[in-house]
Amino acid sequence: MKEKKKLSLPAWIVIALVAGIVLGLICYFAGIADFTTNYLKPIGTIFVNLLKFIVVPVVLFSMIVGILDMGDLKKVGSVGWKTVVYFLVTTAIACVIGLLFAKIFEGAGWFPTLALEEGAVWEKATSANFMDTLVGIFPSNMWQAFFDANMLQVIVIALFFGGCILAAGEKGKLVADFVGSAYAVIEKLMNFVISLSPIGVFTMMAWVVATQGPSIIGALGIVIGCAYIGYVVHAVLVYSLSAKIFAHINPLKFFKGAFAAMAFAFTSTSSAATLPVSKDCAHELGSDDDIASFVLPLGATINMDGTAIYQCVATVFLAALCGINLSLGQMITVVVTATLASIGTAGVSGAGMIMLAMVLTQIGVPVDMIMIIYGVDRLFDMGRTCLNVTGDISCSLCVTEWEKNKAAKKAAKA
């Protein structure tokens, strides 16, 4: 007897999204939106609370593990730091591009504001200037940072502990083993919480549509379009131009050579699964095999340009829904948080939602809003994974050329 094929989690999320929209529309036109507010939203709130509960341990332990895994960077010397700097710089640029397009869409009035029940208000995000943000990054009390879920401080704590565990060498091995074991447990807990996401999507989507009407559905289509414009602009302006400037490869040739990996990543939504195809594409475009073998797996772990654009667009969109206009200081906080977080959370299953929750927490936007956008996360994920893989290939080509130039200079001096 043939065993029935189980539906994947993304499939269940899509089903939950559609079911939530249908139920929400029925309640909206029947005039019984109170049913969703009283009985469905509380269930969605439970899921959001679980999401908030795991954000701090996931970010803390995943970042420390990511830093410990990069202990091998010392062995590869210049290739390692060039790769990491390339990824961090392009991630910061991706954040700026995402924020720019999101603010353009918001300024054009394409991101709506949710209508609230009489007397209800969203907590407004607090404004901050750059120096306040800079000072606020460094914690005076580690436990307070965890208690307040101050994600910038949690990231800094993870960076300090990860670096010091590496510096301690053999004496730090016990702590490194503890962190690895703790992260394995946290990952199981996170997978459990993520598995409940169809329930959260269904209940929150039904509540939002029932209370806001059909207009919210069109807004989701607009925010997806905004993110994809950001993806395309980043791929053209950053990846193809860096390949042209540093690796001397024509942009058309670059995209043609990387197309197979881009298509595979778009459909699989997995940078890790795309690695064999990425290596073939990088080799065909002229990357050294040993450099590609180092850069591409590392990129699958820490290169999050697509996710960075998604986070910035989603953050501005969700803030706009709440009637919150982000200040310059808060936008800088988004860029810093997303860029620093890229070092450790990219390889985590469900990282997009975890990181978005982290960014929303940091700037004071209600995390409940995440469920509005999570139902269509698969559509975002296809584009952002495609962009991430494109960046990995571009980086391998640039690093190859930089290493060739370095070798040529050494040979000329000899």
Image: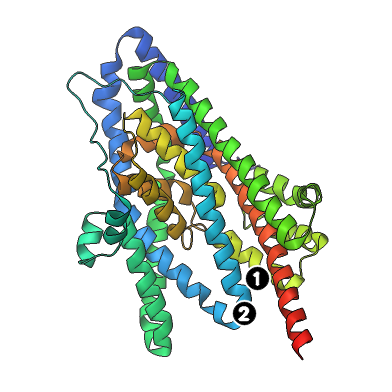
Please name the residue shown 38% across and 59% down the image: 59
Pick the front one: 362 or 68: 362
Q: Where is mark 2, residue-wise?
A: 76
Tell me which label, 2 or 1, sits earlier in the chain: 2
**Res 348 visible:** yes
Please name the residue shown 48% across and 57% down the image: 348
**Res 303 visible:** no
In front: label 2 or label 1: 2
Q: Quarter-wise, where is residue 319 in the image?
A: top left
Residue 359 place in picture, x, y as percent = 37, 48
Residue type at numbered disc 2? Val
Neighbour class for label 1 at 10 Å: few (<14), some, many (≥20)? some
Query: Which residue, as the protein is rendered here, is positioned at the far top?
Result: 30
The secondary structure type at the circle numbered 2 is helix
Identify the disc placed on residue 397: none
Q: Quarter-wise, where is residue 164 in the image?
A: bottom left
| Horizontal relation, residue 8 to residue 153: left or right | right
Marks 2 and 1, how far apart at CA: 9 Å
Q: Where is mark 1, residue-wise?
A: 294
**On the rendered image, what quadrant is the C terminus found in?**
bottom right
Q: Are marks 2 and 1 in contact (CB under 8 Å)?
A: yes
Neighbour class for label 2 at 10 Å: few (<14), some, many (≥20)? few
Pick the front one: 260 or 187: 260
Residue 187 place in picture, x, y as percent = 42, 59
| Horizontal relation, residue 326 to residue 86: left or right | left
Residue 158 higher or lower than 241, as above or below: below
